[in-house]
Image: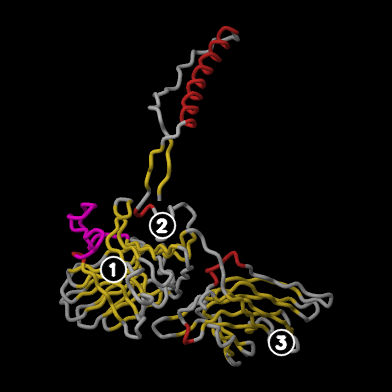
Amino acid sequence: MTFIVTTNFQIDRVTAPRLPAAPTEYEQRYHDQFADILRLYFNRLDGILGRLMATIDTLPVEITGTNLDAFGRVRVSNPFTLFDSSHRYADNNLWATSITGTAAATFSANEGLVNLTVGSASGDQIIRETIKVFSYQPGKSLLVMSTFVMGTANANLRQRVGYYGAANGIYFERDGTTNYMVERSSVTGVLTNTRVAQANWNQDPLDGSGPSGLTLDASKAQILYMDVEWLGLGTVRTGFIINGAFVPAHNFDHANLVTTTYITTASLPLRYEMTNTAATGVTSTLKQVCSTVISEGGYQLAGAQQSAGTTITTPKTLTTAGTFYPVVSIRLKTARLDAVVILTAISILGITNNANYKWEVVMQGATTGGTWVSAGTNSAVEYNITGTAFSSTGGRILATGFFQGSNQGSSSVDILKEALFANQLEREPFTATAYELTLACTSASNGDQVFGSVDWEEISR
């Protein structure tokens, strides 16, 4: 991208004038002298500005490289954060963990991170993956950053960090003592990992011989970045942020080269993982620090609107006072666990005169009874409006409120779209379990009744 700076004259250096010290009492002579000095100074500035505006010559100034996003637009300060993760007081419950053999994820309060450890036996493994996938919006650069400190390189020890899941994505890998950038794809129906060794990185091998002159030490703290120009066929740029600067390492280019999409979807989770491919003889630790996923240039919801709720002839009866009952529950279909679905509104109406109600929106609760119904053939969601019992144990309350029923009519309670991805449906990736999101309600008296509905937007279609 090129900007034009106009110039035709060497600009004389103009320094601020030294102003005379003011007398104790008012003197016109001093006032006139002060005004003359300032008038001369501003006249010189006006002359320079006039010459700049009158010139016709141009000097091109080019902005390139990592100053531009994945689509070639200048990076400006209006990113939209889809996700961020840090660990200040505890493991933040934004990640699912899979353990095989001897392995553990342990929060370190002093370091403010999670230590991922594996034993020394063959097959020992730990994988950490976010319980959400992150929405790629066509035409927007998706910037991903993850920080970590990898364990000491050992034969048969494989470590990975990146934006990927079981089937697709991009990640940095250290296998033994060799570093790779890897593109994982399932577009052919078969899982394929395209590994590019550090010596073959096409932007900078980071061995001291490249444009930056830097040598990468993966056993030290690193900030991995990648920006995705997907549209099915675009470029993925990968590298590291060192000394406050983006240092490109390797680009995966696809446009004008491939004959189909390079990955199935760019809406993916974040992952950290460590595996013993054979016995290592030592215990190893990978430090998981922070991560973020950013849509550069903002984000606009543009999905399919859906809703579900009680029927007008069948209100939900809250049988026992003080007990929460599920009014509407929704979750992802098992076959569409990588879909992006966002709760956009709820409405609840008490129909028992003078009854006092409390409602909650709960993530990861459990609805008992009733029937789960598909929201449509092309929908990623199923819902339950006939559940008979509800437990919020182990879940998170996203919102709560109170209202009162009246024979003069009751008000509705709405959650609008300001929260966006805070109310996104979640899943447990390793057990293929969809987490419920439930509108639940209780009342102060036995047998009070309510109507309720939830609206959501399906980004993945």
Say which residue appears at 49% left-offset and 32% top-offset: 53
Disc 1 to disc 2, C-alpha distance: 24 Å
- Amino acid marked by disc 1: Phe
Which of these two is toward me, 358 or 250? Answer: 250
Disc 2 to disc 3, C-alpha distance: 50 Å
Say which residue appears at 37% left-offset and 77% top-offset: 260
Report which residue position mark 2 lands on: 72
Secondary structure, mark 1, is: strand
Report which residue position mark 1 lands on: 172
Q: Which region of the structure is painted magenta? A: 200-223
| Mark in front: 2 vs 3 | 2
* Residue 162 against residue 239 in the figure, above or below: below
Which of these two is toward me, 233 or 246? Answer: 233
Say which residue appears at 84% left-offset and 75% top-offset: 408
Percent position of residue 308, x then y: 64, 82
Secondary structure, mark 3, is: loop
- Amino acid marked by disc 3: Thr
Disc 1 to disc 3, C-alpha distance: 51 Å
Main structural element of the magenta stretch: helix, strand or loop? loop
- The crowd level at tag 2 (other Cα within 10 Å; few <14, some 14-19, many 20+) is some
- Amino acid marked by disc 2: Gly
CB under 8 Å between discs 1 and 3: no
Name the N-terminal-most of marks 1 and 2: 2
- The crowd level at tag 3 (other Cα within 10 Å; few <14, some 14-19, many 20+) is few
Report which residue position mark 3 lands on: 311
Which of these two is toward me, 347 or 242? Answer: 242
CB under 8 Å between discs 1 and 2: no
Name the N-terminal-most of marks 1 and 3: 1
Say which residue appears at 32% left-offset and 56% top-offset: 241
